[in-house]
Image (cartoon, rainbow, N blue to C red):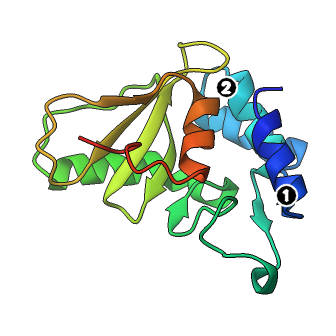
Amino acid sequence: MYLNKIIDKFQQRQVRLMGCKSEEIDSIKQLAKKTLPVCYLEFLRTMGKGMSEDIEKSNYYEYGSFVGTAVFFEDLFDNKEGAIELLNEDGSNLILTEDDFVFYDSQGILFAFFKLSEGDNPPVYFYREGSGQTSFIKTADTLSSFYERYLEGDANLFKV
């Protein structure tokens, strides 16, 4: 499993992971119109519906939160449309293709995606509003390393 390290840390912190049901994963597969990467399917199965933890016992902003982001099942159907809208509003010439799956959005000002054709644990690219980017920036060599770095609070993850 690609996400063992993350899942182990969640279990140590007693974070409750809520995975998607088979029919929900099927609807995401239909949204993608192509085969989803194995690593992403693992994310959907283990924590695709969300996570919860006892806020009294932990710092909510530490490892284990996706505060202010659209990464879970309910958000996925609008992420790409929002990303395209952001690119247009920002006056960018960049274009998302059918091969690009937007799995992460942060408050409508930043999004991340992977290419469906780049393997079971694909690289991750991002775009940030107002950055003047002339191309999408590769932020992680693999989806699993993106999740690890994000959840550990890597300040360089979305550096332009």
Residue 14 placement (x, y as % from top left)? 89, 64
Is residue 129 positioned above or below 116 on the image?
below
Which residue in the structure is indicated by mark 1? 17
Badge nearest the viewer, 1 or 2: 1
Residue at x 22% of width, y 54% of height: 129
Residue type pointed to by label 1: Leu
Residue nearer the viewer, 23 or 20: 20
Q: Quadrant of the N terminus?
A: top right
Residue at x 82% of width, y 79% of height: 54
Q: Residues within 10 Å of mark 1 (few under 14, many from 20)?
A: some
Residue 109 placement (x, y as % from top left)? 31, 59
Residue 52 placement (x, y as % from top left)? 79, 70
Q: Which quadrant of the figure has residue 50? A: bottom right
Residue type pointed to by label 2: Leu
Which residue in the structure is indicated by mark 2? 36
Q: Earlier in the sequence, mark 1 or mark 2?
A: 1
Residue at x 56% of width, y 68% of height: 67
Assign a secondary structure to mark 2. loop
Residue nearer the viewer, 106 or 34: 106
In this rendering, position of residue 155 left or right of residue 15 = left
